Image (cartoon, rainbow, N blue to C red):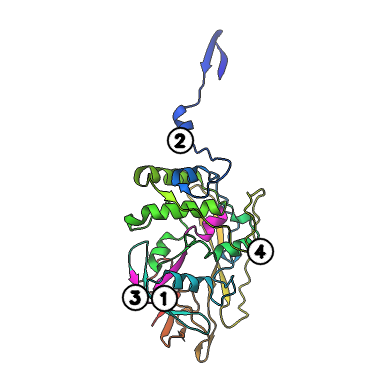
Protein backbone atom coordinates (compact mmCIF):
# COMPACT_ATOMS: atom_id res chain seq x y z
CA UNK A 1 0.00 0.00 0.00
CA UNK A 2 1.44 3.43 -1.01
CA UNK A 3 0.64 6.73 0.68
CA UNK A 4 1.51 10.08 -0.92
CA UNK A 5 2.14 12.89 1.56
CA UNK A 6 3.03 16.52 0.83
CA UNK A 7 5.56 17.78 3.39
CA UNK A 8 6.78 21.38 2.94
CA UNK A 9 6.11 21.19 -0.79
CA UNK A 10 7.96 17.88 -1.25
CA UNK A 11 6.15 14.74 -2.32
CA UNK A 12 6.98 11.81 -0.10
CA UNK A 13 5.91 8.27 -0.97
CA UNK A 14 5.55 5.90 1.99
CA UNK A 15 5.14 2.19 1.34
CA UNK A 16 3.47 -0.05 3.92
CA UNK A 17 3.52 -3.83 3.72
CA UNK A 18 2.25 -6.61 5.97
CA UNK A 19 4.82 -8.63 7.86
CA UNK A 20 5.25 -12.11 6.43
CA UNK A 21 6.21 -13.45 9.86
CA UNK A 22 2.94 -12.31 11.40
CA UNK A 23 0.87 -13.78 8.60
CA UNK A 24 2.69 -17.08 8.84
CA UNK A 25 2.02 -17.43 12.54
CA UNK A 26 -1.71 -16.68 12.31
CA UNK A 27 -3.96 -19.75 12.33
CA UNK A 28 -5.94 -20.42 9.19
CA UNK A 29 -8.68 -22.86 10.17
CA UNK A 30 -9.93 -25.13 7.42
CA UNK A 31 -13.59 -25.16 6.45
CA UNK A 32 -14.23 -28.51 8.13
CA UNK A 33 -12.75 -30.02 11.27
CA UNK A 34 -11.04 -33.36 10.75
CA UNK A 35 -12.42 -36.23 12.80
CA UNK A 36 -9.14 -37.52 14.16
CA UNK A 37 -5.76 -37.74 12.53
CA UNK A 38 -2.53 -35.77 13.05
CA UNK A 39 -3.11 -33.41 15.96
CA UNK A 40 -1.72 -30.39 14.11
CA UNK A 41 -4.17 -30.86 11.25
CA UNK A 42 -7.12 -31.25 13.62
CA UNK A 43 -5.99 -28.09 15.41
CA UNK A 44 -5.93 -26.21 12.09
CA UNK A 45 -9.66 -26.83 11.71
CA UNK A 46 -10.64 -25.21 15.01
CA UNK A 47 -11.91 -21.64 14.75
CA UNK A 48 -9.84 -18.97 16.50
CA UNK A 49 -12.10 -16.36 18.08
CA UNK A 50 -12.25 -14.07 21.07
CA UNK A 51 -13.92 -15.60 24.09
CA UNK A 52 -17.31 -14.30 25.26
CA UNK A 53 -17.09 -14.36 29.09
CA UNK A 54 -20.55 -12.86 29.62
CA UNK A 55 -23.39 -14.48 31.51
CA UNK A 56 -21.81 -17.77 32.60
CA UNK A 57 -23.59 -19.70 35.36
CA UNK A 58 -22.71 -23.24 36.35
CA UNK A 59 -26.44 -23.88 36.66
CA UNK A 60 -26.69 -23.40 32.88
CA UNK A 61 -25.08 -26.85 32.60
CA UNK A 62 -27.28 -29.42 34.32
CA UNK A 63 -24.56 -31.80 35.48
CA UNK A 64 -24.11 -35.11 37.28
CA UNK A 65 -27.34 -36.47 35.85
CA UNK A 66 -28.36 -39.92 34.62
CA UNK A 67 -28.83 -39.04 30.96
CA UNK A 68 -28.88 -42.57 29.55
CA UNK A 69 -31.38 -44.09 31.98
CA UNK A 70 -29.10 -46.76 33.43
CA UNK A 71 -29.63 -45.60 37.02
CA UNK A 72 -26.12 -44.11 37.39
CA UNK A 73 -25.36 -40.40 37.17
CA UNK A 74 -22.41 -39.29 35.07
CA UNK A 75 -20.09 -38.88 38.08
CA UNK A 76 -20.65 -42.47 39.16
CA UNK A 77 -20.32 -43.70 35.60
CA UNK A 78 -16.87 -42.12 35.29
CA UNK A 79 -15.83 -43.44 38.72
CA UNK A 80 -16.82 -46.95 37.62
CA UNK A 81 -15.13 -46.59 34.23
CA UNK A 82 -11.84 -45.18 35.49
CA UNK A 83 -11.33 -47.48 38.49
CA UNK A 84 -8.41 -49.81 37.73
CA UNK A 85 -10.02 -52.51 39.91
CA UNK A 86 -13.63 -53.63 40.14
CA UNK A 87 -15.34 -50.82 42.09
CA UNK A 88 -17.76 -51.34 44.96
CA UNK A 89 -21.12 -49.97 43.88
CA UNK A 90 -24.33 -49.58 45.88
CA UNK A 91 -26.86 -51.68 43.90
CA UNK A 92 -29.76 -49.49 44.99
CA UNK A 93 -28.73 -46.07 43.71
CA UNK A 94 -25.44 -46.79 41.91
CA UNK A 95 -23.27 -44.79 44.33
CA UNK A 96 -19.63 -45.81 43.97
CA UNK A 97 -18.40 -46.66 47.47
CA UNK A 98 -14.80 -47.63 46.79
CA UNK A 99 -12.38 -48.45 44.00
CA UNK A 100 -8.83 -47.74 42.85
CA UNK A 101 -8.14 -44.67 40.78
CA UNK A 102 -4.88 -43.42 39.32
CA UNK A 103 -5.16 -39.73 38.50
CA UNK A 104 -3.61 -39.15 35.06
CA UNK A 105 -2.81 -35.54 35.89
CA UNK A 106 -0.39 -36.32 38.74
CA UNK A 107 -0.09 -40.12 38.96
CA UNK A 108 -1.57 -40.25 42.49
CA UNK A 109 -3.53 -43.34 43.48
CA UNK A 110 -6.73 -43.19 45.54
CA UNK A 111 -9.25 -45.67 46.91
CA UNK A 112 -11.65 -43.18 48.52
CA UNK A 113 -13.99 -41.57 45.96
CA UNK A 114 -14.16 -38.41 48.07
CA UNK A 115 -10.56 -37.68 47.01
CA UNK A 116 -11.59 -37.82 43.36
CA UNK A 117 -13.02 -35.01 41.26
CA UNK A 118 -14.59 -35.68 37.89
CA UNK A 119 -12.93 -33.12 35.65
CA UNK A 120 -14.51 -31.64 32.56
CA UNK A 121 -11.32 -31.59 30.50
CA UNK A 122 -12.64 -28.45 28.81
CA UNK A 123 -14.24 -26.83 31.84
CA UNK A 124 -17.86 -25.72 31.73
CA UNK A 125 -16.94 -22.03 31.86
CA UNK A 126 -14.30 -22.48 29.18
CA UNK A 127 -16.91 -24.23 27.03
CA UNK A 128 -19.38 -21.39 27.65
CA UNK A 129 -16.83 -18.74 26.69
CA UNK A 130 -15.88 -20.73 23.58
CA UNK A 131 -19.35 -21.15 22.11
CA UNK A 132 -21.60 -23.05 24.52
CA UNK A 133 -23.32 -19.76 25.39
CA UNK A 134 -25.24 -20.23 22.11
CA UNK A 135 -26.24 -23.84 22.78
CA UNK A 136 -29.65 -25.06 23.84
CA UNK A 137 -30.07 -26.18 27.48
CA UNK A 138 -30.36 -29.78 26.21
CA UNK A 139 -27.01 -29.54 24.45
CA UNK A 140 -25.31 -28.06 27.51
CA UNK A 141 -26.76 -30.88 29.63
CA UNK A 142 -25.46 -33.44 27.12
CA UNK A 143 -22.00 -31.87 27.25
CA UNK A 144 -21.88 -31.68 31.05
CA UNK A 145 -22.73 -35.38 31.36
CA UNK A 146 -20.94 -36.75 28.29
CA UNK A 147 -19.60 -40.25 28.89
CA UNK A 148 -19.86 -41.28 25.23
CA UNK A 149 -16.24 -40.20 24.67
CA UNK A 150 -13.82 -40.86 27.54
CA UNK A 151 -11.85 -37.71 26.71
CA UNK A 152 -14.61 -35.37 27.95
CA UNK A 153 -14.69 -36.40 31.64
CA UNK A 154 -11.83 -37.81 33.74
CA UNK A 155 -11.44 -38.98 37.35
CA UNK A 156 -8.54 -36.97 38.82
CA UNK A 157 -7.08 -35.89 42.16
CA UNK A 158 -9.38 -33.27 43.70
CA UNK A 159 -6.70 -30.71 44.61
CA UNK A 160 -5.13 -30.93 41.13
CA UNK A 161 -8.50 -30.36 39.53
CA UNK A 162 -9.00 -27.33 41.76
CA UNK A 163 -5.68 -25.88 40.60
CA UNK A 164 -6.77 -26.41 36.99
CA UNK A 165 -10.17 -24.78 37.57
CA UNK A 166 -11.40 -23.36 34.23
CA UNK A 167 -7.95 -22.64 32.76
CA UNK A 168 -6.97 -23.54 29.20
CA UNK A 169 -3.50 -24.89 28.19
CA UNK A 170 -2.07 -21.38 27.97
CA UNK A 171 -2.52 -21.09 31.75
CA UNK A 172 -2.40 -24.66 33.07
CA UNK A 173 -0.86 -28.02 32.17
CA UNK A 174 -0.94 -31.29 34.12
CA UNK A 175 1.92 -31.75 36.63
CA UNK A 176 2.75 -35.13 35.07
CA UNK A 177 4.87 -34.25 32.05
CA UNK A 178 4.43 -37.75 30.67
CA UNK A 179 0.73 -37.00 30.27
CA UNK A 180 1.23 -33.72 28.38
CA UNK A 181 0.66 -35.02 24.86
CA UNK A 182 -2.38 -37.05 25.86
CA UNK A 183 -3.83 -34.01 27.60
CA UNK A 184 -3.31 -31.82 24.53
CA UNK A 185 -4.88 -34.48 22.33
CA UNK A 186 -7.91 -34.71 24.62
CA UNK A 187 -8.26 -30.92 24.69
CA UNK A 188 -8.16 -30.64 20.91
CA UNK A 189 -10.56 -33.57 20.46
CA UNK A 190 -13.18 -32.12 22.84
CA UNK A 191 -12.99 -28.67 21.28
CA UNK A 192 -13.21 -30.03 17.75
CA UNK A 193 -15.96 -32.55 18.45
CA UNK A 194 -18.21 -30.00 20.14
CA UNK A 195 -17.49 -27.16 17.71
CA UNK A 196 -15.86 -24.96 20.35
CA UNK A 197 -13.43 -22.23 19.39
CA UNK A 198 -10.03 -21.32 20.82
CA UNK A 199 -8.74 -17.86 21.60
CA UNK A 200 -5.47 -16.70 20.08
CA UNK A 201 -3.24 -17.38 23.10
CA UNK A 202 -4.78 -20.82 23.65
CA UNK A 203 -4.41 -21.82 19.99
CA UNK A 204 -0.84 -20.55 19.83
CA UNK A 205 0.18 -22.30 23.04
CA UNK A 206 -1.27 -25.63 21.90
CA UNK A 207 0.40 -25.27 18.51
CA UNK A 208 3.80 -24.51 20.07
CA UNK A 209 3.53 -27.45 22.47
CA UNK A 210 2.60 -29.80 19.64
CA UNK A 211 5.58 -28.58 17.61
CA UNK A 212 8.08 -28.82 20.46
CA UNK A 213 6.91 -31.85 22.42
CA UNK A 214 4.19 -33.78 20.58
CA UNK A 215 4.98 -33.49 16.88
CA UNK A 216 3.88 -37.06 16.10
CA UNK A 217 0.69 -36.96 18.16
CA UNK A 218 -2.29 -38.55 16.44
CA UNK A 219 -5.85 -38.04 17.69
CA UNK A 220 -8.23 -40.99 17.59
CA UNK A 221 -11.55 -40.35 15.82
CA UNK A 222 -14.42 -39.39 18.08
CA UNK A 223 -17.98 -40.75 18.07
CA UNK A 224 -21.05 -38.74 17.21
CA UNK A 225 -22.50 -36.45 19.83
CA UNK A 226 -24.60 -38.08 22.55
CA UNK A 227 -28.36 -38.33 22.21
CA UNK A 228 -30.11 -35.09 22.98
CA UNK A 229 -27.19 -32.87 22.03
CA UNK A 230 -28.46 -31.99 18.57
CA UNK A 231 -26.23 -30.68 15.77
CA UNK A 232 -23.30 -28.40 16.55
CA UNK A 233 -23.75 -24.95 15.07
CA UNK A 234 -21.59 -21.86 15.13
CA UNK A 235 -22.72 -19.04 17.46
CA UNK A 236 -24.49 -16.27 15.57
CA UNK A 237 -25.73 -13.93 18.27
CA UNK A 238 -24.40 -12.24 21.35
CA UNK A 239 -24.89 -14.22 24.56
CA UNK A 240 -27.52 -13.12 27.00
CA UNK A 241 -27.02 -13.02 30.72
CA UNK A 242 -29.28 -15.64 32.32
CA UNK A 243 -31.51 -14.76 35.23
CA UNK A 244 -29.95 -15.33 38.65
CA UNK A 245 -30.21 -18.89 39.90
CA UNK A 246 -32.92 -19.68 42.42
CA UNK A 247 -31.15 -20.18 45.72
CA UNK A 248 -34.06 -21.79 47.53
CA UNK A 249 -33.62 -25.51 48.19
CA UNK A 250 -36.87 -27.38 47.63
CA UNK A 251 -35.68 -30.99 47.88
CA UNK A 252 -33.95 -33.01 50.56
CA UNK A 253 -31.63 -35.17 48.46
CA UNK A 254 -29.49 -32.80 46.41
CA UNK A 255 -30.74 -29.20 46.31
CA UNK A 256 -28.58 -26.51 44.76
CA UNK A 257 -27.41 -23.19 46.10
CA UNK A 258 -25.92 -20.43 44.02
CA UNK A 259 -23.10 -18.05 44.87
CA UNK A 260 -22.02 -15.09 42.79
CA UNK A 261 -18.53 -13.74 42.33
CA UNK A 262 -17.24 -10.68 40.52
CA UNK A 263 -13.68 -10.39 39.26
CA UNK A 264 -11.75 -7.81 37.30
CA UNK A 265 -9.37 -9.03 34.63
CA UNK A 266 -6.03 -7.48 33.83
CA UNK A 267 -7.63 -5.62 30.93
CA UNK A 268 -10.15 -4.02 33.26
CA UNK A 269 -13.10 -6.12 32.13
CA UNK A 270 -15.43 -6.97 34.98
CA UNK A 271 -16.67 -10.54 34.84
CA UNK A 272 -19.43 -11.95 37.02
CA UNK A 273 -20.34 -15.58 37.42
CA UNK A 274 -22.71 -17.69 39.42
CA UNK A 275 -21.62 -21.12 40.55
CA UNK A 276 -23.94 -23.89 41.61
CA UNK A 277 -23.09 -26.14 44.52
CA UNK A 278 -24.49 -29.60 45.06
CA UNK A 279 -25.57 -29.65 48.69
CA UNK A 280 -27.53 -31.81 51.06
CA UNK A 281 -30.13 -30.53 53.53
CA UNK A 282 -29.31 -31.19 57.17
CA UNK A 283 -31.84 -32.71 59.53
CA UNK A 284 -32.02 -33.60 63.19
CA UNK A 285 -30.51 -37.01 62.43
CA UNK A 286 -27.66 -35.69 60.29
CA UNK A 287 -27.89 -35.39 56.51
CA UNK A 288 -30.33 -37.11 54.20
CA UNK A 289 -27.65 -37.95 51.63
CA UNK A 290 -23.91 -37.47 51.22
CA UNK A 291 -22.04 -37.08 47.94
CA UNK A 292 -18.32 -37.75 48.67
CA UNK A 293 -16.13 -35.08 47.10
CA UNK A 294 -19.05 -32.87 46.06
CA UNK A 295 -19.46 -29.27 47.23
CA UNK A 296 -21.73 -28.88 50.23
CA UNK A 297 -23.24 -26.56 52.82
CA UNK A 298 -23.50 -25.67 55.59
CA UNK A 299 -19.90 -26.12 56.68
CA UNK A 300 -19.72 -28.51 59.62
CA UNK A 301 -22.71 -30.62 58.58
CA UNK A 302 -22.22 -34.33 59.21
CA UNK A 303 -23.74 -37.26 57.38
CA UNK A 304 -23.32 -40.98 56.80
CA UNK A 305 -22.56 -42.31 53.33
CA UNK A 306 -24.07 -45.55 51.98
CA UNK A 307 -20.88 -47.40 52.98
CA UNK A 308 -21.60 -46.56 56.64
CA UNK A 309 -18.70 -44.11 56.93
CA UNK A 310 -19.20 -40.66 58.41
CA UNK A 311 -18.54 -37.62 56.23
CA UNK A 312 -18.26 -33.97 57.18
CA UNK A 313 -18.85 -30.83 55.12
CA UNK A 314 -15.47 -29.13 55.43
CA UNK A 315 -13.23 -26.56 53.73
CA UNK A 316 -10.14 -28.63 54.61
CA UNK A 317 -9.06 -32.16 53.76
CA UNK A 318 -8.45 -34.85 56.41
CA UNK A 319 -4.93 -33.55 57.07
CA UNK A 320 -6.27 -30.04 57.75
CA UNK A 321 -5.04 -28.47 54.50
CA UNK A 322 -7.56 -25.94 53.12
CA UNK A 323 -8.97 -26.64 49.67
CA UNK A 324 -7.49 -24.19 47.18
CA UNK A 325 -10.88 -22.89 46.02
CA UNK A 326 -11.99 -22.13 49.60
CA UNK A 327 -15.21 -24.10 49.19
CA UNK A 328 -16.59 -26.79 51.47
CA UNK A 329 -16.97 -30.34 50.21
CA UNK A 330 -17.92 -33.72 51.63
CA UNK A 331 -14.89 -35.60 52.92
CA UNK A 332 -14.48 -38.52 55.28
CA UNK A 333 -14.46 -37.49 58.94
C-alpha gap between disc 3 and disc 4: 37 Å
* Numbered badge on residue 320: 3
Q: Residues within 10 Å of mark 2 (few under 14, many from 20)?
A: few
Residue labelled with disc 2: 25
Above or below: residue 288 compared with residue 190: below
Q: Residues within 10 Å of mark 1 (few under 14, many from 20)?
A: many
Q: Earlier in the sequence, mark 4 or mark 1?
A: 1
Residue numbers of the magenta segment: 109-129
Residue 124 lies in magenta, yes or no? yes
Q: Residues within 10 Å of mark 4 (few under 14, many from 20)?
A: few
Residue labelled with disc 4: 243
Which residue in the rendered view is the most extreme toward the bottom?
Answer: 285
Estimate the x, y position of residue 263 in percent, counting from the top left: 51, 57
* Numbered badge on residue 114: 1
Secondary structure at badge 4 equals loop
Is residue 310 among what the camera can see? Answer: yes
Exactly how many numbered labels are in the figure? 4
Amino acid sequence: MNWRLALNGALVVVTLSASNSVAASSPTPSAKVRNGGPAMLVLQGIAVERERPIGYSRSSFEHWRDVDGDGCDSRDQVLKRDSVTLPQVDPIDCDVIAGDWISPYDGARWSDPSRIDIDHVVALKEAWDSGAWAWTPAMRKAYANDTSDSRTLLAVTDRVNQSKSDKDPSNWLPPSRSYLCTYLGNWIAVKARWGLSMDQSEWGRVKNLLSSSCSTLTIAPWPGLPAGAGPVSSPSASPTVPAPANTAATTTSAPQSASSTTTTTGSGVVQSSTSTTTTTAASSTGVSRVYPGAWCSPEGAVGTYTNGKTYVCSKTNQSGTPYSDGRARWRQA
